[in-house]
Image (tube, rainbow, N blue to C red):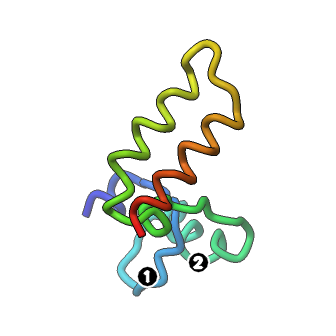
Amino acid sequence: GILDEGGVIPVADFGGDTSGVTSPLLAQSLTELPEAVDFPVMPDIYVPADVSNPMYRATSVAFTPGTDAATICQTVDDIYAAAK
């Protein structure tokens, strides 16, 4: 498959059967790496679907001149409160 032949290193703990893996680098990333690193938190796990689209807009304003951290945090809090 593409993982084995391409040597793609997964960014999350695979936790599956690695017996068919022939690439040494991929095998190491699937067996030793999970114990040696902290994997990134994937936002899809923590951000509910009904919050995702409004969240894109809220976080995009972070790069608008004059927008401060307090405004961004308040906007994110408002989005979560509206989704409940």
Residue shown at the point (52%, 67%) measured from the top left: 12
- Element type where label 2 sits in the image: helix
Q: Position of residue 56 (x, y in %)?
A: 40, 40
Residue at image point 63% right, 22% down: 67
Left or right for 84, reference 74: left
Q: State if disc 1 and disc 2 touch (CB < 8 Å).
A: yes
Residue shown at 49% from the left, 61% from the top: 81
Image-based side of 64 in relation to 4, left or right = right
Query: Which quarter of the picture shows residue 68?
Result: top right
- Give the amino acid at mark 1: Thr
Disc 2 marks a residue whose amino acid type is Thr
Q: Nearer the viewer, residue 60 or 44?
A: 60
Q: Secondary structure beneath disc 1?
A: loop
Disc number placed over residue 31 in the picture, else none? 2
The picture places residue 64, in percent across and down from the top left corner, at 55, 17
Q: Which residue is mark 1?
A: 18
Mark 2 / mark 1, whichever is N-terminal: 1
Q: Observer-nearest residue: 9 or 42?
A: 42
